[in-house]
Image (cartoon, rainbow, N blue to C red):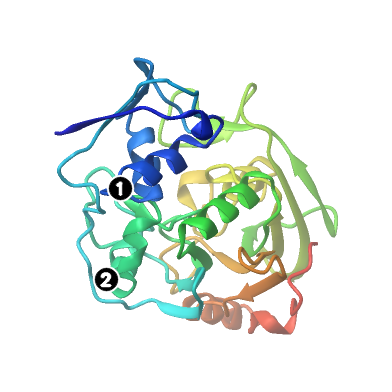
Amino acid sequence: MPTSLLTPTASDAGKRLDVFIAGVEPTLSRSQAQRLIRAQQVRVCGKLAGPATRVPAGAQITVTIPDQTESGLRPEPLSVEILHSDADIIVVDKPPGLVVHPGAGRPHGTLANQLIGRFPELAEVGDGQRPGIVHRLDKNTSGVMVVARSPAAYESLVAQFAAGAVHKAYLALVEGEPSVEGGVIEAPVGRHPTRRTTMSVVRGGKPATTRFRVLATLGQFTLLHVAPETGRTHQIRVHLAAAGLPLAGDAQYGGKKPLAGLDRMFLHARCLRFAHPATQERVHFHAALAGDLVRVLRRHGSPWLRAPEFDPTCESP
């Protein structure tokens, strides 16, 4: 792997490291420079650089460039529904059963593979194995997702999610019935102390807040509108289970009552609202309730058969 030695001038002092590298190294884009920094391939004065590193004047910067800096994802045919696309963002309706990006033991067959096949420019956006991905839905959760299409949009959306400035709304069918019509669950979420693939409410976990309100009571089940204010792994599933209201069909977190015709948990990402990266205008997008979940509600006599009927403005509970 070739190594480049870069020496910034006084005019470069204070620049973001990725901006500086992309400006002086013609073979690298800014997003590629970011990936190299995260991969610990960049040193400043002999020390590994971090994402927040600023350029000191006169310092020696070494950049090790792998033979392949582009995304190694295998492009695949697009089957997901594109709800919206422009120069900066792509909004999709993710179906259940589709993993968002490659991981251990799953190099392909993901949403990221499909998107890189339709939008090859995503190879320059964010992480090479997760091009454009700024948030995730669990494999068996359906619904709306936004993907960054440009490096500037990626930075904007990552910052908005980190700051809690993105409003997310879900439909959830849970076992049991809350004692109140709505409320807030605040409890720290972290790895379960013994089951390492499971999250839990644990002392010392990351702060997490979830709002909910009751939409309909359906016998042994309750349909909820849920709005997580933080984005911890499995947050909705963990918080509802801790409240004695496990998601229907979610055996991992305590769901025990079978639902005819449903082979997954009942959780649907209904709506996203955020500031458009280019215009800063607040925009919102919604995904209609997935067909398998509609059929479940119909069997249980619910009036909530089309998501736009109850939440056209993507409001909080």
In the picture, measured across the screen, residue 157 lies left or right of residue 142, that is right
Residue shown at 31% from the left, 75% from the top: 118
Frontmost residue, 72 versus 52? 52
Give percent across and percent down for residue 205.
Answer: 61, 27
Q: Is residue 165 left or right of residue 130?
A: right
Label disc, if present, on residue 96 of the rendered structure:
none
Of tags 2 and 1, the one toward the viewer is 1
Q: Please provide percent x and percent y for residue 263.
A: 40, 65
Vertical comparison of 226 with 17: above or below? below
Is any atom of residue 142 visible in this view? yes
Figure check: 3 above or below 27: above
To which residue does mark 1 refer? 28
The quadrant in which the C terminus is found is bottom right
- To which residue does mark 2 refer? 117
Please, what secondary structure does the residue beneath circle 1 have?
loop
Q: Which residue is at the front of the view, 280 or 182?
A: 280
CA neighbours of label 2 inside 10 A, class few (<14), some (14 to 19), many (20+): some
Task: Sort mark 1 into few (<14), some (14-19) or many (20+) by Cα contacts within 10 Å.
Answer: some
Q: CA distance from mark 2 to mark 1?
A: 22 Å
**Residue 72 placement, left or right of 61:** left
Quadrant where the image shows the N terminus: top left
Q: Amino acid at mark 1?
A: Leu
Of mark 2 and mark 1, the one earlier in the sequence is 1
Disc 2 secondary structure class:
helix
Q: Amino acid at mark 2?
A: Gly
Q: Position of residue 210 (x, y in %)?
A: 72, 48
Q: Nearer the viewer, residue 294 or 298?
A: 294
Residue 277 in picture, x, y percent from top left: 61, 63
Q: Is residue 37 above or below residue 177?
A: above
The residue at the point 46 percent across, 35 percent down is 17
Identify whether 92 is placed above or below 34: below
